[in-house]
Image (spheres, grey):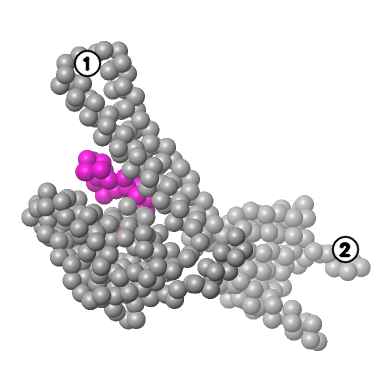
Amino acid sequence: DSSKEMLRRINENMVEGMILLDEDMTVLSVNKSALKILGNSFDPTEHTKINHMTNDQQIIGLLEEAKESGAAKGIITEKSRFYRTFANKVYSENTLDFGIIIFFVDVTEEIQSEQIRRDFSANVSHELKTPLTTIKGFGELLENGIFTKEEDVKKYGGMIYRESERLLYLINDIIRLSQIEEQEHVLNDKIDLLKTAHDVEEILRHKADNREVTMTIEGEPVQIYGNQSYITELFLNLMDNAIKYNHEGGSLNVTVGIEDGKAVAVFSDTGIGISDEHQSRIFERFYRVDKSRSKKIGGTGLGLSIVKHIVAYHSGEISLESELEKGTTITVKLPFNEPETQQAEETAVTE
């Protein structure tokens, strides 16, 4: 029967997991996705009970609830992934016999994104509160005339200024991050990566000289299509970090080239390095390896997160190799991309 065959094919190729049981909790059918989730094999001739297939009490609980009340839903966890799960009672035609159908929909990314958003909100509140508390405290002392000596006024006025500056950097980074996340992917600028590296070298020259860090830019001119201001920001963030977290007399080497059909920029420094335990988390928002040092040199904890988002925005890849006290090498690979002129024109027309 063609309609039965069609249903079988749909069932087998569904991304969602599906299990059909009878009223005695005997498994009648299981699709590929459900077997993958439960990590089990299934033989319909064995009349397997669901509790022999899985001992997950959340699943058993939802099935019991559906048996009692007709429907149940919840989120279950299997092998570090989250599934929104629906169990429903299904009656046979013209009889009182029933079965239960259970669906598993993978919502891992959704739940993780929600967690990141919650963490981000909590971190933002904390990060904004700290400098504001300092500014408020010193402002109050100045207002009440507790500081009368000129050097005190200068000292605490300077602290208010520096904390305000940090606050501004932080707010700018937060705005930048949300812009990159929400913006449409229009990659129309023709970008020369080697020229971008030289331009950023000029911007950071004074800072590098002050810290006695030698910058070297080498490689070949490589052109890609992308967002020029974001790519400049990517170079600025990575090169600035390599100067800020370097030893006096250290060096930063930026090499631009082509590898495996992609544009590649390698940022290699002789800085303080990052230990293995921190390396996997370094691109998270507000994650700092050394909080006191980072804050002292004006780090917001968002720089590498912005870099990661810019790389993702351009459908690129970023990797990191580092050894404590030896230095860090960050490699960015970016596709060449085609200019989206036609798409941009269509957008312009609709606007």
Q: Which residue is situated farthest in the right direction here?
A: 94
In the picture, the disc for residue 194 is: none
**Residue drawn at x 40%, y 64% as measured from the top left:** 227
Instruction: Give the quarter of the figure containing the N terminus.
Output: bottom right
Residue 341 in the image: state x and y as whole percent.
49, 72
Residue 96 in the image: state x and y as whole percent.
88, 63
Residue under pointer 1: 147
Q: Amino acid at mark 2?
A: Leu
In terms of image quadrants, where is residue 324? bottom left
Which type of secondary structure does the marked residue at label 2 adopt? loop
Residue under pointer 2: 96
In terms of image quadrants, where is residue 310? bottom left
Q: Locate residue 220 relative to residue 120 in the image: left or right.
A: left
- Answer whether labels 2 and 1 touch (C-beta < 8 Å): no
Q: Which residue is situated farthest in the left direction here?
A: 249
**Residue drawn at x 11%, y 59% as measured from the top left:** 214
Q: In this orientation, which residue lies closer to the viewer: 294 or 17?
A: 294
Q: Amino acid at mark 1?
A: Phe
The residue stretch that appears in magenta:
279-302
User: Which secondary structure class fits the magenta region best?
Assistant: loop
Q: Which residue is situated farthest in the bottom direction here?
A: 1
Query: From this viewpoint, is residue 315 visible?
Result: yes
Which type of secondary structure does the marked residue at label 1 adopt? loop
Q: In this orientation, which residue lies closer to the viewer: 134 or 226?
A: 226
**Residue drawn at x 45%, y 73% as measured from the top left:** 339
**Residue drawn at x 31%, y 16% as measured from the top left:** 143
Looking at the image, is 118 positioned above or below residue 323? above
Q: Locate residue 248 relative to residue 255 in the image: left or right.
A: left
Classify mark 2: residues with Cα within 10 Å, few (<14), some (14-19) or many (20+).
few
C-alpha separation, residue under disc 2 versus residue under disc 1: 86 Å
